[in-house]
Structure formats: C-alpha cells, structure tokens
Image (cartoon, rainbow, N blue to C red):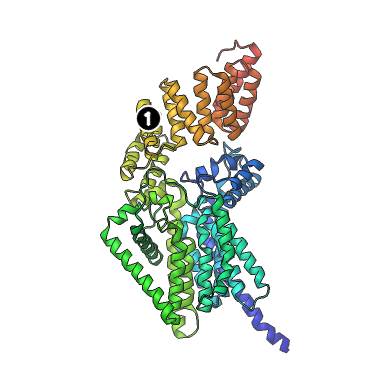
Amino acid sequence: MSEDTTAQPDLIKRGRGIFACLTIILAALALYGGTANYGFLEHDDDRNIYENHRILNPTSSNYASYWSEPYLGLYIPVTYTYWTALSGLSHALSDTSETQNEAQKPDPRWFHRGNVILHATNGLLVMMLLRIVGFGLLASTFGALFFVAHPLQVEAVAWASGAKDVWSTFWGLLSLVAFARYLNKQIPHRRLMLSLNYIFYALAILCKPSQVVIPALCALMLYHKESKFSLQRLTVFIPHGVVLSAYLLLANVSQGAEGTFKPVPLALRPLIAGDAINFYASKIILPIDLAVDYARHPYAVINNKGALVLSFLTLVILAVSLVATLVTNKPWLKKTTVVCGMFVVSLVPVLGLVPFGYQFFSTVCDRYAYLAVIAPAWALASMTQGVGARRRAIQIITTLYLLTLSFATAHQIEYWHDETTLFQHSLEVQADGAVALIGRSNELAKKGDWRSTLPLLERASQALPDWARPHNNLGTSFVNLDRYQDAADALAKALKLRPVYPLAWSNRCSVVRQLKRLDEAAHDCKMAVDQAPEFAPAHLNMALTLMDMGNWAGAAASYQKALALDPNNYDSLYFWASALRDRGDYHGAIQSFTKLAALYPRSEEARRELEHTQSLAATGGTAKN
C-alpha cells in the first residue's frame, strides 16, 4: 500500500511532463502545420535549394565540396548536407508524377515539414533548458510556448531557407542544455555533458556562424547559477575558443554585400547596434507590421536623430544595469541583467558592431531574432514561476497573451504562402523595401508580364542606388521586350556597381551575342566562368557564343562542362542536342533529345525535336522540318 502511495506523485509528475510536451508539439503543429503545403520562394530558395546543382546532383564530390570550401559566401556544410538529405528524401518518398521537372526540383513540402518538426523540437529544448536551470514545469511550458508561438519566429519557420536559423538553433539549444546539465552537480556524467556541449556548439556554427554566441550564453548561465566568474570556472570555455578558431580558419562568417557598401564608422556602430536592439525589443513586445524587408539601412538610422537618441539611452541603461548588478548583486537585478544579456548576446553577430552583408539592405531582419527569443521566454518563465493567488492571476493573463500571440502568428504565416502575398504585404509595411520590390517584380516576370516589372525595378534602383541586382533584372526584362541595347546598358550598369557578378556577366554575354558583338560576348562569358566556375548557365552561354564564332571544339567543351554541372538542365540538353544534329551526329542528338523528352514529358518541343531528328537519321538528313 505504501509503495503505491509513494509512486503516485512520481506518476502524476511524469504525466504532467508528457502533457506539457504534447502541448508544445501540438501548438507548433497547429500553427505551422499548414506550411507543409507551401512551395519554394524565389526569395533565396532558388539558389540555396532548388537551383543548387550540388543538391540536384548529390554525388560524393558535391557532398565533400560543402565541407572543403564556402558556398555562396558562407561555410555552413551541416545546413547544406541537411538540405541535400531532404532533397533525397523528397525524391524517394514524394509522388512527382504530375510535376514536369521531376528529375530536378525537390518537393518543397519536405523542407517545410523539416522546419516545423525542428521548431517543435526547439520548443521542447527551450522547456528542457528552463527546467534544468530551475523553473517549474508550468513556468517552463509558458516560456517554451512563447518561443514557439511568437510571430517574430514566422520568417525562420515558414520559409524553406529559414532552416539555417531553425536548424542551427536546434544544435545551439542542445549545446545550452548540455551545459546546463553540466552546471547541475546532482547530475551524473557531468564531463560527458561538457563534451557534448562542445560537439553541439561545433555543429551549430557549422549550420550558421551566428551561433558563435553560444559560449557567451553559457557564461551567462554560469553567472546566473553562481553569481561570479572565477578563473578556474572560465577555463571550461577554452575548447569553445579552439572550435571557433578552427572554424574561422576554414570559413567566412559573413556574406559579402551585393553592391558598394560603405562601412559604418566604428564610433557610430554602437548606436546602430542600440537601434537594432530597440527594434527587436519592440517587435517582441508588440509584434505588428512584421515584414520581409524593413529597408532600415545603416545610414538611414544614422540620419534619424530620434532613433539615435533612443539608441543612446538604451545603451546607457544597459551599461548602468550591468554595473549595478556587479556592484550590488541584488537578485532581482541579476535576473533582469541575465535576461537582457541573453537577448543582446544572441543578437551580437547581427547588430552591426561587425559589418555583415545583409546590412546592405537592412540592419534588422525577423529571422535574425530566432535564437534571441529564448531571452523573453526565460523572462516569461520567471514571471509565471511560483504559486499563490497573484501568480495564478499572472498565469491566466499569460495564457491569454499566448493565445493572442498565436492568432497573430497564424495571420502572419498566411503571408508566406506565396511570393505575391509576401512581398505585397511587405511593401504595405515599407514601401521602399528594395528586396520586396525585386520579389514582386520576379512574380510578374514569372507570369510573363515583363512590362509591369520595369517600374518596380526602377523603384528598387532608386530605393537602393548601389544595388546591382535591379539593373541585372532590368536587363532580363528588356531582353524579353526585345530591347537588347537597353538590356546591354542595364547589365553594364549592374557590373559597374558590382564587378564580381557572374550572373550579370553571363546575362550580358547572352545579350551582346544577340547584338552580334561576339568578341565582347566571349569576354563577358569568360568573366562569368572565371568568377563562378560552377555556374552552369555561364558555360552554356559560352558554348553558344563559341558556336556562333565557329569554334566547335571550344563550344563542345563548354557544353560538356555545363551538362556536367547540371545534367538535367533543359536549355543545356536542348542546345547540345541541336548542335550535335547540326553537325550530323544524329545518334548523339537522338540520345540527348530522348533524355530531354523523358525528363520533360510535357514539353511538346522536346518530343517534336526528337521525332524530327529521328526522321533525319532515317532519311540521311533529307527530311523536312
């Protein structure tokens, strides 16, 4: 009888823990489950995933290349390996019979499902972290639900490319949980926990370099537990430094800007950082008018005197609070400083103290705050901790607040359903958002409405005069409007702003080839190939140019290079097959057209060209087209 009585409280506790975990999982699924049916966006999903030839052709050498060198300016091999695995999974399990380009494009649903599962898991890890550092089950659940349900998290979770933040935070949170368990002297195998902390940290920064802040968050947790830093205790962070040093030897920690970027003077960078802190804090408290592009450029902030005053006041308050905490060591002040410290530290890589590429567009971005949301989650857990009538009232208010956040999140998620909705909403929030203007113009371009793209691209070039991409896209629009000289001029402007721009060089090669300026075209293609040897379209344009110049050997080599990089590309296969046929190699042409027709079963052109080539082969080249 006594044994049953003793076991009952443990059983109740276990049941409550399971219920709390299920609540967090169900909250994530209820909010984000619908995103599993969303598609890819041309907003970075193209170059990261569905047009990334390494993902489309998952060979051992392509896998190895992620680990041997940066890709697209960042060394994040764990993230690209994750995406490649999802692509393989999508091809293995998805029904692609109704998609034309089934041999290439992975199913976006698996990428969105991955984000949802990771986000739910991160919510569980936040709850686990809060429990380990001393918060009760209910308080920890409130904190985890805040992390899961806050609208600021939508960009990272609802966007396939946002996996960089969700996936890296998964490993970052595992590292924090391991360190929290190491700090708990009641837990066995503490040294194992510390080793896991180092391993998870390495994986986190190999997903996204902004996770370099994990050791600083661990230090804040150490201070939260012991209220002091001893030299002996700080030695636990030496391996973190070794891991970071090894990473920096291999990697870039920030992507380059897409145009001329004037660095912010050192003396003004703290004010830029303070303004970013204010922005993120305001969106945490009142998450309204969230957008994909805030157009909050550094020099726009510098020219805003009101923003600078608020930034200065924030920095003063943070500094005074830190000093007061160290001097007085009052518990309530220490708790506040730890929370504020976690929030600021999580954002340090993107505050502008060190320049980073996205500053060219904006100093702030929703997805950059994904990890930082653990700080207000910690604060909410602290507020709801305990029992009594007052705490019960706070917990009821918190429940209502979380429900309000959930409704706001559900509404925000709808904007990510497609690019038209996403960028139109963003422009309603910030009409001068150059990124949103480009995104909206891309949607019109996909519909073939090239003329309507022109005013949007002109607005983008005026909003961000040093950005090369609007001029490159203007070149594409002009080509489709048969304005080849205007296209060449626009692309020349893009290259003046950004000389290392292989896409623009390749596009200009194609344009000046149409203008019969073949030597100039060959030069532009060579620039594209030299700058981006893995950019298949540049090799294709080079092949077409060399064909026009009568250089068959050079053209054949360029065709082969383009097909080696992107074996299933429609244009490369089509033009290569056509070139073989023109040379009288009907057998090779039939092979290539057969592959093309199999890969693109809905293409009438591919089927027609195959039949024509077969007729030529049967009649010795005398059949009429």
The quadrant holding residue 598 is top right
* Neighbour tally class for label 1: few under 14, some 14-19, many 20 plus, Cα within 10 Å: many
Badge 1 marks a residue whose secondary structure is helix
Instruction: Assign the N terminus to one quadrant of the image.
Output: bottom right
The quadrant holding residue 306 is bottom left
Amino acid carrying mark 1 in the image: Ala
The answer to whether 203 is drawn above or below residue 1 in the figure is above
Residue at image point 58% right, 30% down: 561
Q: Nearer the viewer, residue 90 or 48?
A: 48
The answer to whether 579 is drawn above or below residue 461 in the figure is above
The residue singled out by tag 1 in the image is: 487
Q: Nearer the viewer, residue 481 or 270?
A: 270
Residue at image point 38% right, 39% down: 468
Q: Is residue 108 left or right of residue 394?
A: right
Residue at image point 36% right, 58% down: 269
The quadrant holding residue 182 is bottom right
Spot occupied by residue 373 in the image (x, y as percentages of width and height): 47, 65
